[in-house]
Image (spheres, grey):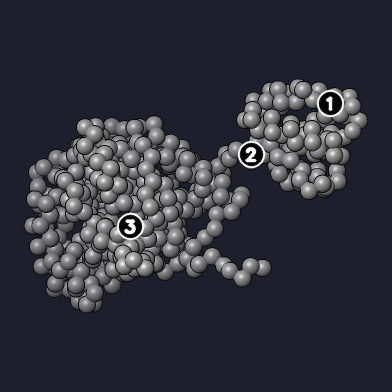
Amino acid sequence: MSTFKAPKGTYDLIPPDSAKFLAVREAISAPLRNSGYGYIETPGFEDVALFSRGVGESTDIVSKEMYAFETKGGDKLALRPEGTASVLRAALEANLHKSGNLPVKLWYSGSYYRYERPQKGRYRHFSQVGAEAIGAEDPALDAELIILADQAYRSLGLSQFRILLNSLGDKECRPVYREALQGFLRDLELDEDTRRRIEINPLRVLDDKRAEVQKQLVGAPMLRDYLCDACKAYHEQVRELLNAAGVAYEDDEKLVRGLDYYTRTTFEFVHDGLGSQSAVGGGGRYDGLSEMIGGPALPSVGWALGVDRTVLALEAEGVELDLPATTSVYAVPLGEEARRVLFGTVTELRRAGVAADFAYGGKGLKGAMKNANRSGARYTIVAGERDLADGQVQLKDMETGEQVPVALDAVTAELRRRLA
């Protein structure tokens, strides 16, 4: 037993379960790669001010959950709690927005860190796949990203998820709503932390999950009643494009998400089979974020989908992914000469694209065949001195039990034919 354990609120990805996570990442990224999004990877830590400015000082992420630290050189850094600010920072630093080809379309995959109370579906270290379309204000982009996420989930076999949709307005109409909401909230019986939030970002109070707070929010002003004509028209275009694509969604006037940078379109993917941690992903438009972190005006939209929560959603629906076999062929040598020859055969099979493994450790036939069975291989190659003298190996079908001799120089071709 090891002296050390994984830190509280984290998890290790270990075979065979890790294959599910790889398959989910592949399924989520596949529609993006097919739609002009290029891969980007950013550091696991950034300047702490990047998140305090972009995500927002009043958010739980920045005020309570961020892993912040000071380096020996005096730099104040934070483990990234989300991906959008990092990706936008990288795009600005590399001047991708000056290439003349807007929007800049990027996708990413990685680990993120928040100091939260650990529970099923909520971890201190978690995995996401995200996408950002930077530098264009177009309802078709908002709709595109929602459609691509819906496509990814359906390709995995998920069906019991819902898409919640709302508009948060823009710099023209949101201040008027903000003032009306603040006036309403100031008359409620709320704790001091929540009262401070009213003055900094009152929309975040609407996102409070506590029942005693939600009860008092009945009758609160709704943002939809304060949207300017431009925001109403923009949101209606997003809805029309989703309707035309056959993507079902639910209008949710209370949806604000947990980050300060969202404007106009905001959306969330929820799965009712996950209990209290029902959100599997979400995103929205963030037209002012670039300016918040020192860049030019670059209207943008994006989302992030949780890999671990998507795996939990698959389990909740009882969906079994069709995962490729890690080993298709297992080689069992009997004797030193066979060991040398079959190791060469395994190398040849791998070069030909066949997933092959080898009986290491000099085990006898019985032990080696047990390993072959545990590997899940469809075929086993067995060879001893007599087989090699005849220029052949024994090929065993592990499903039917059938065993036939195959010429040594024809093994790769024969296995490729059988596995095709």
* Residue 352 location (% of width, % of height): 64, 28
Q: What element carries label 3?
A: strand
Crowd band around label 3 with a 10 angstrom C-alpha radius: few (<14), some (14–19), many (20+): many
Q: What residue type is labelled 2?
A: Ala
The residue wearing badge 1 is 392
Q: What element carries label 2?
A: loop
Task: Decide which of tag 3 and tag 2 comes sooner along the chain.
Answer: 3
Which quadrant, please, contains the N terminus?
A: bottom right
Quarter-wise, where is residue 200 in the image?
Answer: bottom left
The residue wearing badge 2 is 325
Q: Does residue 178 lie above or below 338 as drawn?
A: below
- Horizontal side of 379 relative to 3 (left or right) equals right
The residue wearing badge 3 is 46
The residue depicted at 9 percent of the width and 44 percent of the height is 229
Q: What residue type is labelled 1?
A: Gln
Can residue 267 be seen here? The reply is no
